[in-house]
Image (tube, rainbow, N blue to C red):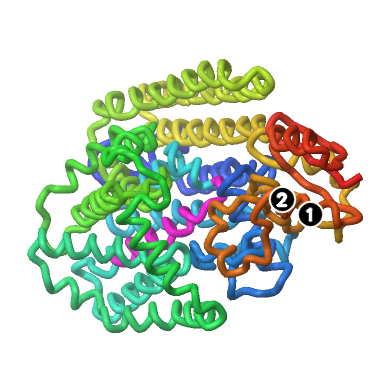
């Protein structure tokens, strides 16, 4: 207890920071929890399979300019994560762990950034608590372990935000301000190469709103926009020019369809109520949701000079407002808001009186334990009879996550009542992160219905590498990765539609063309849904079933 109890309280209130050796041990423990399960879970469809396969094809082909999915041009996103993952494949081999490495590494780096910037801007207690909040809230932790592009964008947004706040401190010298702003603009460029123009839009809107609210138009000049624009162009232009030169169809699809049409229309069929992100953010911030609310309210208080907390508040409002207005909504879109929310939470926790901690922490943390338990109860009763045992297995993991969270709440209460505030924070944060990791590991129980991995494992030794492999009426994004090769889609387009318009020779548009190709091949394989298999069998197409699960059948040409 002595390593925790004295601590330091460089802010008012109960935000005590543990001794240096305890902070190091906490960092090592958190890193172990954070990276422990990366390679233990099967990649699931659609996102994890897609963003694992595109880099695999890039690494195999050596074409680092044109992204391809299943051998087909795929221009929905820029290449930053593809490059990083393809490089990881070259260094360590293609596996679920290396596929998730960029997401996990950028998520972990975001926590370190919040700690460093929080300490410099708001005091060590605020930085320490902000890092605990970011690394252990439900939403950020889960998305830091799922292979999507959102965490990479969130990292660069976080880096740019932190650099901007450090640059605009009143006591920052002119030369230092310029260097910090150069880092901020380089982070914007990294965000553009991670997920597109949204990395420019979010900070641009936040800054414009801040200048209007604060009546501080001089901020624009202090941001060195000419230097910044040149840096962004210098970093981003080479790839955009190269991919446009190799693929003249790229620019219109990427800039118009994937940005403006995605935002303004329902073309991607991701329509949700405008308010959907508000409850998602509240639940996602558990067990720290109440602290985030307090931090948001306190951030509006007036302050002289550049108002860093108000900028963080405006950043959060812009992120959630922008995506609420969009006609295309996915849960991960608001992830760039969470580092700012964590910083505001850390400031609030560092400055709240100790008596307030029970109401702001214990209740939401208990609610998270209850939600894990409710999820366990619900999942244990879900699924069709054929797959019900898988859901029952997953529910056991969720019960374990609920129990872990409950232990964390009890530990927090124990340490708080013994005036070891830092120990209480650490116990709760580690419990929340561990519960999240348990839930993720448990989700792998559903892999047979969420991934092609187990089905492919059963037929891998029977597949001849140079024989055609067809995917009839369906396309599982994990299939190519686990097969280690591309397949020919039949009578199916979906997200491959644009690429197939450019490369129509890479697919078969109808079942009848598949029938002709199948009969002409001396050896071939196909995957299809059971209903399709029954229909083709009834039409007397010669096929031999070699593997089946509840959703798919793999057949061979006899």
Q: Identify the residue shown where x is 71% and y is 41%.
A: 528
Predominant secondary structure, magenta span: helix
Q: Which mark is residue 512?
A: 2
Pointer 1 and pointer 2: residues touching (CB < 8 Å)? yes
Element at label 1: helix
Q: Identify the residue shown where x is 55% and y is 45%.
A: 145
Q: Disc 1 and disc 2: Cα gap in Å? A: 6 Å
Q: Say above or below: 168 vs 149.
A: below
Residue 473 located left or right of residue 546: left
Residue 104 located left or right of residue 336: right
Of residue 409 and residue 24, the one placed in the foreground of this image is 409
Residue 262 lies in quadrant: bottom left
Q: Position of residue 272 (x, y in %)?
A: 34, 40
Circle 2: is it few (<14), some (14-19), or many (20+) Cα within 10 Å? few
What span is in magenta? 145-164
Residue ID for mark 1: 516
Is 553 covered by the magenta stretch?
A: no
């Amino acid at each position: 207890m002595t390593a925790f109890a004295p601590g330091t309280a460089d802010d008012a209130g109960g935000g005590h920071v543990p001794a240096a050796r305890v902070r190091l041990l906490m960092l090592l423990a958190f890193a172990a929890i954070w990276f422990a399960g990366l390679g233990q879970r099967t990649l699931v469809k659609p996102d994890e399979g897609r963003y694992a396969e595109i880099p695999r094809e890039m690494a195999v082909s050596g074409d680092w300019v044109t992204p391809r999915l299943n051998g087909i041009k795929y221009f929905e996103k820029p290449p930053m994560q593809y490059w990083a993952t393809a490089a990881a494949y070259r260094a360590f081999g293609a596996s679920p762990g290396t596929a998730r490495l960029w997401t996990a590494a950028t998520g972990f780096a975001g926590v370190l950034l919040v700690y460093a910037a929080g300490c410099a801007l708001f005091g060590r207690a605020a930085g320490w608590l902000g890092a605990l909040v970011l690394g252990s809230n439900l939403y950020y932790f889960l998305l830091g372990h799922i292979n999507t592009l959102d965490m990479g964008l969130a990292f660069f947004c976080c880096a740019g935000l932190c650099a901007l706040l450090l640059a605009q401190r009143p006591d920052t010298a002119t030369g230092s301000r310029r260097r910090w702003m150069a880092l901020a603009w380089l982070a914007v460029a990294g965000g553009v190469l991670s997920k597109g123009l949204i990395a420019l839009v979010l900070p641009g809107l936040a800054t414009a709103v801040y200048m209007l609210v604060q009546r501080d138009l001089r901020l624009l000049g202090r941001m060195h926009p000419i230097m910044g624009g040149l840096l962004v162009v210098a970093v981003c232009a080479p790839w955009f020019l190269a991919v446009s030169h190799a693929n003249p169809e790229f620019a219109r699809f990427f800039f118009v369809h994937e940005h403006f049409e995605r935002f303004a229309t329902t073309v991607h069929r991701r329509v949700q109520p405008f308010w959907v992100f508000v409850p998602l953010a509240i639940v996602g911030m558990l067990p720290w949701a109440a602290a985030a609310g307090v931090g948001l309210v306190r951030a509006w208080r007036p302050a002289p000079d550049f108002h860093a907390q108000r900028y963080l508040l405006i950043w959060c409002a812009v992120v959630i407002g922008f995506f609420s207005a969009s006609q295309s909504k996915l849960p991960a879109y608001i992830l760039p808001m969470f580092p700012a929310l964590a910083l505001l939470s850390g400031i609030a926790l560092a400055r709240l009186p100790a008596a307030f901690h029970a109401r702001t922490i214990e209740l939401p943390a208990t609610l998270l334990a209850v939600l894990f338990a409710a999820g366990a109860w619900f999942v244990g009763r879900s699924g069709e009879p054929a797959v019900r045992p898988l859901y029952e297995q997953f529910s056991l993991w969720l019960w374990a996550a609920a129990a872990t969270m409950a232990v964390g709440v009890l530990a927090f209460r124990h340490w708080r009542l013994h005036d070891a505030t830092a120990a209480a924070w650490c116990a709760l944060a580690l419990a929340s992160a561990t519960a999240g990791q348990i839930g993720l590991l448990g989700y792998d129980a559903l892999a047979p219905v969420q991934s092609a991995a187990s089905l492919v494992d059963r037929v891998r030794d029977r597949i001849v590498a140079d024989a055609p492999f067809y995917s009839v009426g369906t396309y599982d994004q994990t299939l190519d990765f686990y097969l280690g090769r591309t397949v020919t889609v039949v009578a199916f387009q979906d997200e491959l539609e644009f690429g197939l318009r450019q490369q129509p020779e890479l697919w078969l548009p109808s079942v009848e063309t598949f029938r002709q190709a199948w009969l002409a091949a001396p050896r071939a394989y196909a995957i299809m849904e059971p209903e399709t298999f029954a229909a083709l069998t009834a039409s007397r197409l010669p096929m031999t079933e070699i593997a089946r699960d509840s959703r798919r059948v793999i057949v061979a040409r006899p």
